[in-house]
């Protein structure tokens, strides 16, 4: 084993000593499976014979599960509704051994629920035929903001990093972020950001991990495949965020790490380019990147570990996690 491999292994071995707070939007993913029977007489639609139902977590929920799989102790700072979907979230986290006392249940707020209906013949692979989203916006009440502020203050004192997972349901309040960020900076605690639609609303984070479409949306540009366009976009976003680092995920093209006064570091995708499923891969990437930074890893090391993790998880079906053993096996295979 060479020195580089040993250094990456040493970072992974520190994961079980970490506590990382996750502030963001928990999403419940519901999968309904059925077999096709015939076309309905009532309308030109298929009739499905119901088989089973499965649940998984998306958004901040998937980040929590990914951190747990790495051996980290995740600390949720999240909001759920007082509804069946919210109770399902609590059950799933509880079964994974994740403390749920950081979940704030709010009456009248519908826990974000994405229902996917999958259908096919009896012995064939089921295909998604419909998705139904149940959505709402986390309210702006003074009582809720006080609870979130209190949780963030505690996290700045007790946690090794803060991971922000913003899927635009407004658990993450911009004024609370502005008030809390100095606390984490004063404690020298890294703050990482994954924001679907508000990337530029949280300046000063340690690092953001957008994908290319999110970068294009934030800057109102097209990157395409031009290396100069990517370089210019990365530097512009780095300047606008006022961050020391930026990690852009590029799907089958790998990742690009930007740092101040440093040439971009382009990382080719690890593993096969014949991707199975990218669902939730961004949650895995930011989870591994955050954990590595919390261990004191350099951004380049954190990006490499995140790249290995991303390459592993996109070969799995649905939202998935990566274990320390899988990461170590990937490092060995990549050398």
Image (cartoon, rainbow, N blue to C red):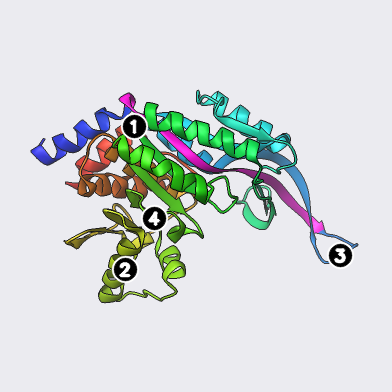
Q: Is residue 192 left or right of residue 335?
A: right
State how far apart marks 2 and 4 are (Cα): 13 Å
Q: Quick one: label 1, few (<14), some, or many (20+) residues within 10 Å?
A: many
Per the rendering, the mark at residue 176 is none
Most common secondary structure along the magenta stretch: strand
Judge whether residue 138 is colored magenta: no
* Span colored in magenta: 16-38
Q: Identify the secondary structure beneath mark 2.
A: helix
The quadrant where residue 328 appears: top left
* Residue on which the image places disc 1: 160
Q: Is residue 217 left or right of residue 144?
A: left
Q: Identify the secondary structure beneath mark 4.
A: loop
Residue mark closest to the camera, 1 vs 3: 1
Q: Residue at x 37, y 46 (%)?
A: 192
Specify the farthest residue to the right.
42
State how far apart marks 3 and 4 are (Cα): 51 Å
Mark earlier in primary sequence (2, 4): 4
Q: Residue at x 50, y 23 (%)?
A: 97
* Residue on which the image places disc 3: 43
The quadrant where residue 72 appears: top left
* Residue on which the image places disc 2: 236
In this orientation, which residue lies closer to the viewer: 267 or 108?
108
Dots 2, 4 in contact, CB < 8 A: no
Mark earlier in primary sequence (1, 3): 3
* Residue on which the image places disc 4: 203
Mark earlier in primary sequence (2, 3): 3
Dots 2, 1 in contact, CB < 8 A: no
């Amino acid at each position: 084993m060479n020195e580089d491999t040993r250094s990456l292994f040493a970072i992974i071995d520190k994961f079980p000593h970490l506590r990382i707070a996750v502030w963001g939007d928990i999403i419940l993913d519901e999968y309904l499976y059925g077999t096709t029977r015939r076309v309905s007489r009532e309308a030109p639609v298929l009739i499905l014979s119901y088989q089973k139902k499965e649940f998984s977590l998306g958004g901040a929920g998937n980040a929590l599960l990914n951190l747990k799989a790495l051996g980290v102790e995740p600390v949720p700072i999240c909001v759920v509704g007082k509804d069946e979907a919210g109770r399902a979230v609590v059950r799933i986290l509880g079964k994974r051994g994740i403390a749920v006392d950081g979940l704030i249940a709010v009456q009248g707020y519908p826990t974000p629920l994405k229902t996917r209906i999958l259908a096919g013949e009896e012995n064939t692979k089921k295909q998604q035929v419909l998705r139904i989203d149940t959505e709402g916006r986390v309210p702006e009440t003074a009582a809720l903001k006080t609870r979130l502020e209190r949780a963030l203050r505690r996290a700045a004192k007790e946690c090794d990093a803060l991971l922000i997972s913003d899927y635009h349901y407004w658990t993450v309040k911009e004024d609370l972020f502005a008030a809390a960020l100095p606390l984490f900076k004063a404690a020298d605690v890294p703050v990482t950001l994954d924001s679907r639609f508000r990337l530029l609303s949280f300046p000063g984070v340690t690092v953001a991990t957008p994908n290319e479409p999110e970068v294009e949306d934030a800057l109102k540009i097209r990157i395409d495949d031009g290396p100069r366009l990517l370089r210019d976009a990365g530097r512009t976003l780095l300047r606008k965020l006022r961050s020391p680092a930026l990690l852009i995920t590029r799907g089958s093209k790998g990742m690009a790490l930007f740092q101040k006064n440093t040439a971009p570091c382009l990382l080719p995708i690890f593993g096969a380019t014949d991707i199975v499923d990218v669902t939730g891969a961004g949650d895995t990437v930011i989870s591994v990147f955050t954990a590595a930074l919390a261990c004191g890893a350099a951004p380049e090391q954190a990006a490499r570990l995140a790249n290995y993790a991303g390459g592993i998880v996109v070969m799995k079906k649905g939202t998935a996690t990566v274990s320390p053993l899988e990461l170590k096996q990937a490092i060995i295979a990549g050398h």
